[in-house]
Image (cartoon, grey):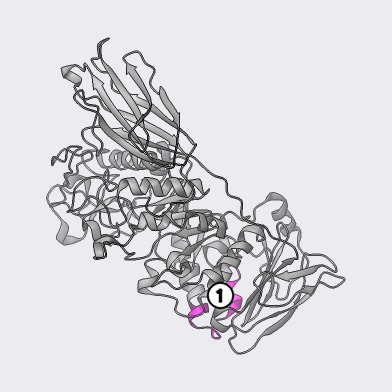
Amino acid sequence: MRSVIGTIAHGVSISALAAALLVCGTGRAAAGVLLQGFYWNVPTPADGDPNADFWWDHITKQAKALREAGFTAVWLPPVWKAASGAVSMGYDPFDDYDLGSKNQEQTIATRFGTREKLERCVAILRANGLDVYIDVVDNHRDGGNNKTYQYKDADGKPNGGRFAKNPGDFSCGCGANDVSGCVPEDPNVPTPGLCFGDELAPINGTPPQHCFNGLLASADWMTRALDVQGYRLDDVKGISTQFIPPLLNFGALNGKFAVGEFFDGDLDLIRNWISNTSGRASAFDFPLRFNFLTPMCNNAGFFDMSQLDHAGLAGVDPFHAVTFVENHDTDRSSPIVTNKAQGYAYILTSEGYPSVFYKDYSTDNGCYKMKAVIDPLIFIHEQIAAGATQQRWKNHDVFAYERLGGAHLLVGLNNNGSSAQTITVNTGFGASTNLHDYTGHSGDVQTDGTGRVTITIPKNTNGLGYVCYSRAGIGGPFQVVEQDVTQQYEGSQDLDIKPADNTTFVPVCRVFVAAGRPIKGALDYFDTTNWTDATSIQLELDDPNGAKLAAGDFVRNTPQGQSISATAGPTGFYTCRIRSANTPTENAKPSYKLSVTYRAPQVLDPGQ
């Protein structure tokens, strides 16, 4: 959190520096709340309950409620087929071009579901105005044979899949995994030596650029296939800093949000990583979580609250800070076990981009059921908290600060579990202004003739020792801006969708469309190599009952990108099929890229 005057003890008037910050807009305004949309070992039918939803469907069914609660983005777990198959959490990725559609590693679906379920999940999240971030694991691969990786093709035949890998695509790190042909560790890897699989070598791999170009192309393919808005980069300590900017500026990734997991409490190391990647990615605020939030919550009453002034990455660089209280790793290794609500009160009222952990938030069985506590804080973050921050009070037990943008927000945190704390502070609300505590923890108050106010912060029972004051009367539901998706389906023998065939229609995709919404299928690319005037491709769009809604013929002279379109009848799956005719021997099964633009419903009904 930024304090515009770092030395004041009990608050003074806004300085010229603070005024400049407000004019220039350098304080981070309310920029959304991220939900980490999973936790370790989320339920799956592969665990033995055939009636359990796949995770993609479980998240899909909550999309509307999540947006109504104020979330603006959802971070999904790794989407690729992994070495441990249907039980994997995705952090042992195997095939860069299998999103749950190939029969590999003893399963078609990933732990979370099939590619089709994933596409529908993304589409319904977007229909509710939520951005979607995918967890990208580019540090390593797993499941190969002595650092040799071969994948199935569109017909399920082995050794025909795209982006096969050999030892030259991997570094020689981690001793027991060393094999002939691997390459030395890249000196631009921030902290080499910690291996989670066969470590990829995008910068110095052999043949040159094979691994580099392959990783860029596969990330671009995934982005186009799903139509996502951002990425969480796993284990960036093990990824060359020379690789991150080219990856995030490549193809469909260009300009999209990204946040790196630099798992370390050392603030300088994280700031160096951000700098070395040209500021292209944000970083999770592990320094804030490890050094401040954990002791504040777990050792309530013994933590010095004045340390929260300029705490963590958010205290010095809020624009690159993604703050969090818990995640899937810390929940298992170093959890916050008491007073967690106060941690959420801090990150959801401070600068930075806050991330809420699903297991903390959800009312599912086995989760911590903090929704009732977190929802009001999300409201405060999105509708009140904005602008630069000014410290108003700090001592061992209490830290108070004011957000200076918009309606202004005065926050008081009391870490004392034995007694309430009453303080009088300066504010920027002005004279004789009625203020309401939007947490419901304390009564309404009024500023005096000079803008000062006296507030009482309740004792810190179960982490609820906080208040959030602003002008009375702020309210209203969150606006939902529905979004279409454009998901691209690439048909090629070395992928998971077959190329066009002159003997039968090839099923390209099924997309889940809301009733009455337009559907457009654009053939962005089709391979016309060696075509004659008699060669063609037919594209067909069918309704949920199999009736043809639209069709188009594409010949040698048809412009690339030509489309067909129709309007959906009932909500359901609409199918695109493709077939070639009179193809030459040299190009008997033409490859293609089909982009389908549609809008999903906001709600997934039972049975769908």
* Residue 407 placement, left or right of 254: right
Asked whether residue 196 appears in the rendered view, the answer is: no
Identify residue for label 1: 342
Q: Mark 1: which amino acid?
A: Gln
Instruction: State the residue in front, 133 or 170.
Output: 133
Magenta segment: does it hold 445?
A: no
Instruction: State the residue in front, 451 or 356.
Output: 356
Q: Residue at x 26, y 59 (%)?
A: 88
Residue 265 percent across, percent down from the top left: 44, 68
530 versus 383 height, above or below = above
Q: Residue at x 58, y 63 (%)?
A: 378
Residue 167 percent across, percent down from the top left: 17, 47
* Residue 183 placement, left or right of 114: left
SS category of the residue bearing label 1:
helix
Asked whether residue 19 appears in the rendered view, the answer is: yes
449 versus 65 height, above or below = below
Residue 533 percent across, percent down from the top left: 27, 9
Q: Residue at x 19, y 16 (%)?
A: 584
Q: Which region is colored magenta?
A: 295-310
Q: Quadrant of residue 429?
A: bottom right
313 versus 595 height, above or below = below
Q: Quadrant of residue 337?
A: bottom left
Which residue is farthest top? Answer: 533
Residue 151 percent across, percent down from the top left: 18, 43
Q: Residue at x 82, y 65 (%)?
A: 430
Labels in figure, total: 1
Instruction: State the residue in front, 417 or 434.
Output: 434
Magenta segment: does it hold 306?
A: yes
